[in-house]
């Protein structure tokens, strides 16, 4: 599992147990240790490097961090980010 935490918002990137997303990573956003929204499968394969994981986590955090801190819904943002790939493109 990879994780990025800034202030009170965390983004986790880890393997999924979902059969339709097998071999891919999922991400979860947390605020104050409470899950903010659903868990989202990505297009990122499980064999990424730590550097790739850091880039992906940063890209996700840049989109969800501020809205999550302010208590806004991040559902639409997360749905868009579910298309992220190993190059942090979405």
Image (tube, rainbow, N blue to C red):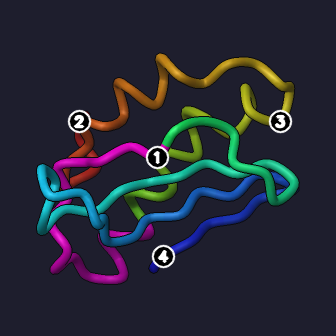
**What range is drawn magenta here?**
39-54
Location of the C terminus (image quadrant): top left
Residues at marks 2 and 3, CA–CA distance in whole angstroms: 23 Å
Q: Which residue is drawn at 30% across and 65% down?
A: 16
Closest to the observer, 46 or 53: 46
Residue 43 included in the magenta stretch of the image: yes
In space, the residues marked 4 and 2 are separated at their CA atoms by 18 Å
Residue 81: give x, y in percent of width and height. Answer: 36, 34
Res 39 label = 1
Based on the displayed image, in which of its 4 quarters is residue 68 positioned?
Answer: top right
- Circles 1 and 4, Cβ within 8 Å, touching? The answer is no
Q: Is residue 31 placed above or below 82 in the rendered structure?
A: below
In this rendering, which labeled residue sits more in front, label 1 or label 3? 1
CA distance for labels 1 and 4: 15 Å
Q: Where 90 sits versus 33, above or below? A: above
Q: Which of marks 2 and 1 is in front?
A: 1
Q: How much space separates mark 2 and mark 1, taking CA atoms?
A: 13 Å
Q: Which residue is label 4 attached to?
A: 2
**Residue 28 vertical position relative to residue 65 in the rendered view, above or below:** below
Badge 1 crowding class, 10 Å Cα cut-off, few under 14, some 14 to 19, many 20 or more, is some
Tell me the SS state at disc 3. helix
The structure residue drawn at horizontal position 51% and vertical position 54%, both measured from the top left corner, is: 58
Residue occupying image coordinates x 38% and y 43%: 40
Residue 64: x, y in percent?
61, 35
Q: Which structural element holds mark 4?
A: strand
Tag 2, which secondary structure? Answer: loop
Residue 89 image point, x, y percent: 23, 41
Q: Residue sitting at 48 percent across and 76 percent down?
A: 2
* Residue that mark 2 sits on: 83
């Amino acid at each position: 599992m990879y994780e990025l935490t800034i202030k009170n918002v965390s983004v986790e990137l880890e393997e999924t147990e979902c059969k339709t997303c097998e071999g891919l990573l999922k991400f979860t956003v947390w605020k104050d240790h409470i899950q903010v929204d659903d868990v989202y499968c990505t297009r990122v394969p499980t064999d990424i490097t730590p550097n790739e994981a850091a880039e992906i986590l940063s890209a996700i955090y840049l989109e969800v961090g501020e809205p999550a801190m302010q208590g806004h819904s991040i559902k639409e943002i997360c749905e868009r980010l579910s298309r992220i790939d190993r190059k942090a493109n979405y």
